[in-house]
Amino acid sequence: MSTDKNAWIPEQETSVGTKFLQKARKSPLVPIGMMGFVAVTAYGFYRLKERGSMKMSVHLIHTRIAAQACVVGAVTLGAVYSMYKEYFLKQK
């Protein structure tokens, strides 16, 4: 095998984990929303056996809405925080 000195080599090796950490540093509430989504979904599956007479579709809809609320809430808090940081802290 020969080594080509003119071959393109990326400056920095990026993997999925490093990309995720970079994005988490920029907006830290998104991973928190993702963890909330996973927690609510796991709790919904845990409570699946003890749902009583509730229909399966209603139980899944409630679980989905709670999980989406965690993600939307975290994204909203992140947007409000970035607006506060950008507009109110720069004025002082």
Image (cartoon, grey):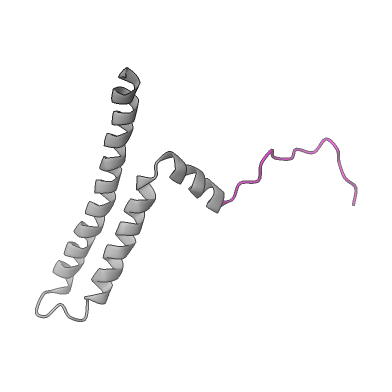
Q: Which residues are magenta?
A: 1-16
Q: Is residue 46 above or below residue 62?
A: below
Q: Is residue 44 above or below residue 30?
A: below
Q: Nearer the viewer, residue 6 or 90?
A: 90
Instruction: Point out the residue furthest to the left here.
Output: 53
Q: Is residue 67 above or below residue 91?
A: below
Instruction: Identify the residue at horizontal 28%, vertical 24% (top origin).
Output: 88
Q: Position of residue 10 (x, y in %)?
A: 69, 40
Instruction: Choose top left, top right, bottom left or bottom right for residue 61.
Output: bottom left
Main SS of the magenta segment?
loop
Q: Quadrant of the C terminus?
A: top left
Q: Count all numbered tags in the image, as a single digit.
A: 0
Q: Nearer the viewer, residue 34 or 1?
A: 34
Instruction: Point out the residue furthest to the front here.
Output: 92
Position of residue 12 in the picture relative to residue 61 (left or right): right
Q: Any magenta on residue 8?
A: yes
Q: Position of residue 27 (x, y in %)?
A: 40, 41
Q: Position of residue 65 (x, y in %)?
A: 20, 57
Instruction: Choose top left, top right, bottom left or bottom right for residue 86.
Output: top left
Q: Position of residue 38 (x, y in %)?
A: 33, 62
Instruction: Identify the residue at horizontal 53%, vertical 46% (top origin).
Output: 19
